[in-house]
Image (cartoon, rainbow, N blue to C red):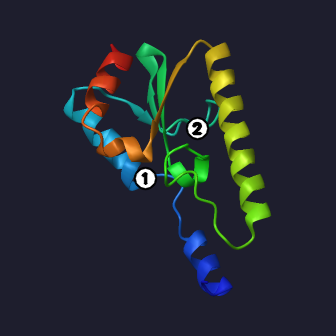
Amino acid sequence: MEDPAIRSKTMAAVKGKDTEPELVVRRLCHSLGYRYRLHRADLPGKPDLVFPSRRKVIFVHGCFWHGHDCARGSRVPKTNRTYWVAKIGRNRARDERYQQRLRELGWRVLTVWECETKSPGLKRRIVRFLN
């Protein structure tokens, strides 16, 4: 079991934007010729990539933090389990609210999960979404 002070320091160092999975998606979109805006604060949830002329947004979610159903996302820390289950549940509910609000405003939404950034099918999925 990890020392609580070390765990706290580790969790505090987790970035909210410009994460490695986000940079992978940004580089891929740019290499495909798509141009975008980043983290527009005027949109619900501040989407990671915004394609204004297409009215499309991409969120890049970390599997653990947003509760993906992959191996990494379904792991819950052994310490303070009640807190983490509630925290990740709140994150998922918030994500769904933001996506629903964006759809109501006429935006199309794609979520790319951290585990998908290594998938060879990601390029095809993004092209299909943006075209």
Depicted 94 relative to depicted 50: above or below? below
The residue labelled by disc 2 is: 46
Q: Looking at the rendering, which quadrant does residue 78 occupy?
A: bottom right
- Could you say where residue 111 lies in the image, as x and y percent from the top left? 49, 32
Depicted 77 relative to depicted 64: above or below? below
In the picture, which quadrant includes the C terminus?
A: top left
Closer to the chain start, of discs 2 and 1, is 1
In the picture, which quadrant includes the N terminus?
A: bottom right
- Could you say where residue 69 lies in the image, as x and y percent from the top left? 55, 43
Q: Which mark is residue 78?
A: none
Depicted 9 relative to depicted 26: above or below? below
In the visual, does 21 lie left or right of 79?
Answer: left
Question: Residue drawn 71% across and 60% down?
Answer: 84
Which type of secondary structure does the marked residue at label 2 adopt?
Answer: loop
The residue labelled by disc 1 is: 18
- Could you say where residue 112 lies in the image, as x and y percent from the top left? 44, 36
At label 1, which amino acid type do we have? Asp
Which type of secondary structure does the marked residue at label 1 adopt?
Answer: loop
- Could you say where residue 93 lies in the image, as x and y percent from the top left? 73, 38
Report, in whole angstroms, how far the alpha carbon at label 2 lies from the one at label 1: 13 Å
Q: How many marks?
A: 2
In the visual, does 107 lie left or right of 128?
Answer: right
Depicted 89 relative to depicted 46: above or below? below
Mark 2 crowdedness (10 Å alpha carbons): few <14, some 14-19, many ≥20: some
At label 2, which amino acid type do we have? Lys
